[in-house]
Image (spheres, grey):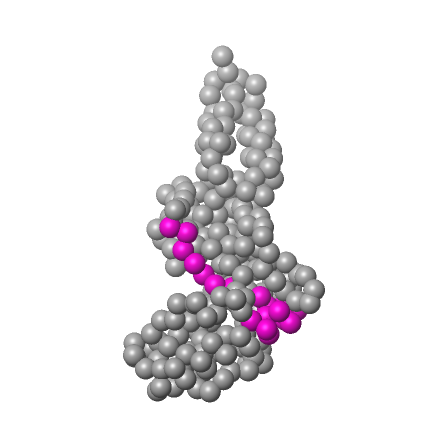
Amino acid sequence: MRACLSAIVMAFALTAPGFALQSDDMIVVTGSRMADYESDFVPSVRLERRADAISVRVRVVCDTREEAQRLRELRDTLRNLVRAGRQSSNVAIGLLVDRNDIGDQLIVDFDETMIDSLPIGTGRGRTDTSEVVIMATTAISPEDTVDATTVRINDFIENTRVVGRTEMLNTNDWELTVTGGPARYRDEIIAAIAADAHRTAAAFGDDFTIEVSGLEGGVHWQRAGAMELSLYIDYALSVRPAQ
Protein backbone atom coordinates (compact mmCIF):
# COMPACT_ATOMS: atom_id res chain seq x y z
CA MET A 1 0.00 0.00 0.00
CA ARG A 2 2.34 2.64 -1.37
CA ALA A 3 0.43 5.82 -0.51
CA CYS A 4 -1.87 4.71 2.23
CA LEU A 5 -1.35 7.51 4.72
CA SER A 6 -5.07 7.90 4.33
CA ALA A 7 -5.90 10.21 7.20
CA ILE A 8 -3.98 11.93 9.97
CA VAL A 9 -5.69 12.47 13.27
CA MET A 10 -4.99 14.15 16.55
CA ALA A 11 -3.95 11.54 19.13
CA PHE A 12 -6.17 10.17 21.83
CA ALA A 13 -4.81 9.95 25.40
CA LEU A 14 -6.26 9.03 28.76
CA THR A 15 -6.34 12.25 30.77
CA ALA A 16 -8.48 13.35 33.69
CA PRO A 17 -11.39 13.34 33.83
CA GLY A 18 -11.78 11.30 30.67
CA PHE A 19 -10.51 10.10 27.33
CA ALA A 20 -9.56 13.19 25.25
CA LEU A 21 -8.12 14.21 21.91
CA GLN A 22 -4.56 15.50 22.23
CA SER A 23 -1.83 16.89 19.98
CA ASP A 24 0.26 13.91 18.81
CA ASP A 25 -0.45 12.41 15.40
CA MET A 26 -2.67 9.35 15.17
CA ILE A 27 -3.09 7.80 11.73
CA VAL A 28 -6.44 6.47 10.60
CA VAL A 29 -6.37 3.41 8.35
CA THR A 30 -9.37 4.19 6.16
CA GLY A 31 -10.86 0.95 4.93
CA SER A 32 -13.06 2.64 2.33
CA ARG A 33 -9.94 3.97 0.54
CA MET A 34 -7.75 0.85 0.81
CA ALA A 35 -8.44 -0.28 -2.77
CA ASP A 36 -7.10 3.01 -4.12
CA TYR A 37 -3.73 2.41 -2.46
CA GLU A 38 -3.34 -1.35 -2.73
CA SER A 39 0.25 -2.25 -3.52
CA ASP A 40 1.03 -4.83 -6.19
CA PHE A 41 3.87 -6.05 -4.00
CA VAL A 42 3.99 -6.59 -0.26
CA PRO A 43 7.44 -7.64 1.02
CA SER A 44 7.88 -10.78 3.07
CA VAL A 45 9.14 -8.96 6.18
CA ARG A 46 6.37 -7.07 7.94
CA LEU A 47 5.16 -6.46 11.48
CA GLU A 48 1.77 -7.55 12.71
CA ARG A 49 0.51 -5.13 15.35
CA ARG A 50 -2.80 -4.42 17.03
CA ALA A 51 -4.24 -0.95 16.37
CA ASP A 52 -4.30 1.55 19.24
CA ALA A 53 -7.90 2.73 18.88
CA ILE A 54 -11.03 2.47 16.82
CA SER A 55 -13.06 5.44 15.53
CA VAL A 56 -16.72 5.20 14.54
CA ARG A 57 -18.86 7.69 12.64
CA VAL A 58 -21.96 8.75 14.60
CA ARG A 59 -24.83 10.60 12.89
CA VAL A 60 -26.59 13.26 14.98
CA VAL A 61 -29.94 13.81 13.23
CA CYS A 62 -32.98 16.00 13.98
CA ASP A 63 -36.24 16.10 11.96
CA THR A 64 -38.25 18.70 13.88
CA ARG A 65 -40.31 20.49 11.21
CA GLU A 66 -39.68 24.13 12.22
CA GLU A 67 -36.11 25.02 11.22
CA ALA A 68 -35.11 27.32 14.09
CA GLN A 69 -36.34 24.82 16.67
CA ARG A 70 -34.72 21.93 14.77
CA LEU A 71 -31.31 23.60 14.77
CA ARG A 72 -31.68 24.54 18.43
CA GLU A 73 -32.48 20.95 19.39
CA LEU A 74 -29.57 19.63 17.31
CA ARG A 75 -27.06 22.07 18.79
CA ASP A 76 -28.30 21.46 22.35
CA THR A 77 -27.79 17.74 21.77
CA LEU A 78 -24.26 18.43 20.48
CA ARG A 79 -23.55 20.38 23.67
CA ASN A 80 -24.69 17.41 25.72
CA LEU A 81 -22.45 15.21 23.57
CA VAL A 82 -19.41 17.44 24.17
CA ARG A 83 -20.05 17.43 27.93
CA ALA A 84 -20.52 13.66 27.97
CA GLY A 85 -17.23 13.23 26.09
CA ARG A 86 -15.40 15.35 28.66
CA GLN A 87 -16.71 13.12 31.44
CA SER A 88 -16.23 9.77 29.68
CA SER A 89 -13.30 7.60 30.76
CA ASN A 90 -13.13 5.63 27.51
CA VAL A 91 -14.76 7.53 24.62
CA ALA A 92 -13.58 10.77 22.97
CA ILE A 93 -15.46 12.71 20.31
CA GLY A 94 -14.11 14.72 17.40
CA LEU A 95 -14.88 16.08 13.96
CA LEU A 96 -13.52 14.74 10.68
CA VAL A 97 -12.18 17.59 8.52
CA ASP A 98 -10.36 17.68 5.19
CA ARG A 99 -6.73 18.70 4.80
CA ASN A 100 -6.91 19.79 1.20
CA ASP A 101 -3.20 20.62 1.03
CA ILE A 102 -2.25 16.93 1.19
CA GLY A 103 -5.56 15.23 0.46
CA ASP A 104 -5.79 13.68 3.91
CA GLN A 105 -8.26 14.11 6.74
CA LEU A 106 -7.94 15.11 10.38
CA ILE A 107 -10.03 14.28 13.40
CA VAL A 108 -9.95 17.38 15.57
CA ASP A 109 -11.17 17.88 19.10
CA PHE A 110 -14.84 18.92 19.21
CA ASP A 111 -15.77 21.48 21.86
CA GLU A 112 -18.66 23.80 22.63
CA THR A 113 -17.01 26.84 21.02
CA MET A 114 -17.40 25.15 17.61
CA ILE A 115 -21.09 24.30 17.83
CA ASP A 116 -22.72 27.58 16.74
CA SER A 117 -20.48 27.90 13.64
CA LEU A 118 -20.53 24.20 12.75
CA PRO A 119 -21.81 23.51 9.21
CA ILE A 120 -25.03 21.48 9.43
CA GLY A 121 -26.02 19.29 6.53
CA THR A 122 -29.29 17.90 5.26
CA GLY A 123 -30.12 14.49 6.70
CA ARG A 124 -31.82 11.55 4.98
CA GLY A 125 -32.13 13.56 1.78
CA ARG A 126 -34.90 15.72 3.26
CA THR A 127 -34.91 19.50 3.58
CA ASP A 128 -36.72 19.29 6.93
CA THR A 129 -34.01 17.11 8.48
CA SER A 130 -30.61 18.33 9.71
CA GLU A 131 -27.53 16.24 10.44
CA VAL A 132 -23.98 16.42 11.78
CA VAL A 133 -21.51 13.51 11.73
CA ILE A 134 -19.05 13.18 14.61
CA MET A 135 -16.33 10.62 15.31
CA ALA A 136 -16.45 8.59 18.53
CA THR A 137 -13.12 6.98 19.43
CA THR A 138 -12.23 4.39 22.04
CA ALA A 139 -8.83 2.88 22.85
CA ILE A 140 -8.25 -0.80 22.08
CA SER A 141 -6.98 -2.96 24.92
CA PRO A 142 -5.08 -6.24 24.33
CA GLU A 143 -8.20 -8.22 25.24
CA ASP A 144 -10.65 -6.13 23.20
CA THR A 145 -12.90 -7.30 20.39
CA VAL A 146 -14.80 -5.23 17.83
CA ASP A 147 -18.01 -6.18 19.65
CA ALA A 148 -16.63 -4.91 22.97
CA THR A 149 -15.59 -1.56 21.50
CA THR A 150 -19.00 -1.26 19.80
CA VAL A 151 -20.71 -1.82 23.16
CA ARG A 152 -18.65 0.99 24.74
CA ILE A 153 -19.54 3.44 22.00
CA ASN A 154 -23.22 2.40 21.94
CA ASP A 155 -23.41 2.79 25.73
CA PHE A 156 -21.90 6.26 25.39
CA ILE A 157 -24.47 7.20 22.75
CA GLU A 158 -27.41 5.78 24.71
CA ASN A 159 -26.36 7.57 27.91
CA THR A 160 -26.03 10.97 26.23
CA ARG A 161 -29.22 13.00 26.56
CA VAL A 162 -30.82 14.04 23.26
CA VAL A 163 -33.08 17.08 22.92
CA GLY A 164 -36.47 17.11 21.16
CA ARG A 165 -36.60 14.91 18.07
CA THR A 166 -32.82 14.53 17.79
CA GLU A 167 -31.32 11.05 17.42
CA MET A 168 -27.75 9.75 17.62
CA LEU A 169 -27.09 6.80 15.33
CA ASN A 170 -24.02 4.56 15.26
CA THR A 171 -23.25 4.01 11.55
CA ASN A 172 -20.87 1.10 12.33
CA ASP A 173 -18.52 2.75 9.81
CA TRP A 174 -15.26 2.39 11.70
CA GLU A 175 -11.55 3.02 11.22
CA LEU A 176 -8.44 1.69 12.96
CA THR A 177 -5.89 4.17 14.29
CA VAL A 178 -2.19 4.11 15.23
CA THR A 179 -0.82 6.57 17.79
CA GLY A 180 2.20 8.46 16.47
CA GLY A 181 1.67 7.07 12.98
CA PRO A 182 3.30 4.02 11.41
CA ALA A 183 6.72 5.72 11.34
CA ARG A 184 7.11 4.81 15.01
CA TYR A 185 7.69 1.21 13.85
CA ARG A 186 10.37 2.09 11.30
CA ASP A 187 13.41 1.03 13.36
CA GLU A 188 11.72 -2.22 14.34
CA ILE A 189 10.87 -3.03 10.71
CA ILE A 190 14.42 -2.25 9.51
CA ALA A 191 15.84 -4.49 12.26
CA ALA A 192 13.57 -7.30 11.07
CA ILE A 193 14.65 -6.75 7.45
CA ALA A 194 18.33 -6.83 8.48
CA ALA A 195 17.82 -10.08 10.40
CA ASP A 196 16.11 -11.63 7.38
CA ALA A 197 18.94 -10.46 5.11
CA HIS A 198 21.52 -12.09 7.40
CA ARG A 199 19.60 -15.38 7.36
CA THR A 200 19.34 -15.23 3.59
CA ALA A 201 23.07 -14.51 3.25
CA ALA A 202 23.89 -17.47 5.50
CA ALA A 203 21.72 -19.76 3.39
CA PHE A 204 23.58 -18.86 0.17
CA GLY A 205 27.06 -18.93 1.67
CA ASP A 206 30.20 -16.85 1.20
CA ASP A 207 30.07 -16.97 -2.60
CA PHE A 208 27.07 -14.64 -2.66
CA THR A 209 26.27 -11.22 -1.32
CA ILE A 210 22.91 -9.73 -0.29
CA GLU A 211 21.76 -6.27 -1.32
CA VAL A 212 18.78 -4.45 0.21
CA SER A 213 17.26 -1.38 -1.45
CA GLY A 214 14.23 0.83 -0.87
CA LEU A 215 14.79 1.44 2.84
CA GLU A 216 14.53 5.18 2.26
CA GLY A 217 10.79 4.76 1.66
CA GLY A 218 8.07 5.36 4.23
CA VAL A 219 6.26 2.86 6.43
CA HIS A 220 3.10 1.48 4.84
CA TRP A 221 0.35 -0.71 6.21
CA GLN A 222 -2.82 -2.60 5.56
CA ARG A 223 -5.40 -4.28 7.74
CA ALA A 224 -4.42 -7.79 8.76
CA GLY A 225 -7.57 -8.56 10.76
CA ALA A 226 -10.51 -6.99 12.53
CA MET A 227 -8.23 -4.98 14.83
CA GLU A 228 -4.77 -5.85 13.54
CA LEU A 229 -2.46 -4.09 11.10
CA SER A 230 0.39 -5.31 8.92
CA LEU A 231 3.16 -2.67 8.70
CA TYR A 232 6.07 -2.75 6.26
CA ILE A 233 8.63 -0.84 4.20
CA ASP A 234 8.46 -1.44 0.45
CA TYR A 235 12.03 -2.77 0.21
CA ALA A 236 13.68 -5.19 -2.24
CA LEU A 237 16.28 -7.87 -1.44
CA SER A 238 18.55 -9.35 -4.09
CA VAL A 239 21.23 -12.07 -4.09
CA ARG A 240 24.34 -11.61 -6.24
CA PRO A 241 27.60 -13.48 -6.71
CA ALA A 242 30.30 -12.02 -4.51
CA GLN A 243 32.92 -10.04 -6.44
Residue 65 is covered by the magenta coloring: no
Residue 96 is covered by the magenta coloring: yes
User: x, y percentage for residue 29?
Assistant: 47, 54
Taking the image as drawn, is residue 234 in sight?
Answer: yes
| Viewer-proximal residue among 232 and 179 | 179
Rendering quarter of residue 82? bottom right
Taking the view exactly as shown, the residue that stands out farthest to the right is 16
User: x, y percentage for residue 67?
Assistant: 36, 82
Q: Is residue 241 left or right of residue 90?
A: left
User: x, y percentage for residue 92?
Assistant: 58, 66
Q: How many marks?
A: 0
Q: Is residue 64 left or right of residue 10?
A: left
| Viewer-proximal residue among 226 and 8 | 8
Q: Is residue 33 left or right of residue 231?
A: left
Above or below — where is 145 with respect to 198? below
Q: Residue at x 66, y 61 (%)?
A: 14
The magenta segment:
82-100
User: x, y percentage for residue 16?
Assistant: 70, 64
Q: Residue at x 47, y 18 (%)?
A: 241
Rendering quarter of residue 157? bottom right
Q: Residue at x 48, y 52 (%)?
A: 8
| Viewer-proximal residue among 35 and 87 | 87
Taking the image as drawn, is residue 29 in sight?
Answer: no
Q: Residue at x 54, y 48 (%)?
A: 181
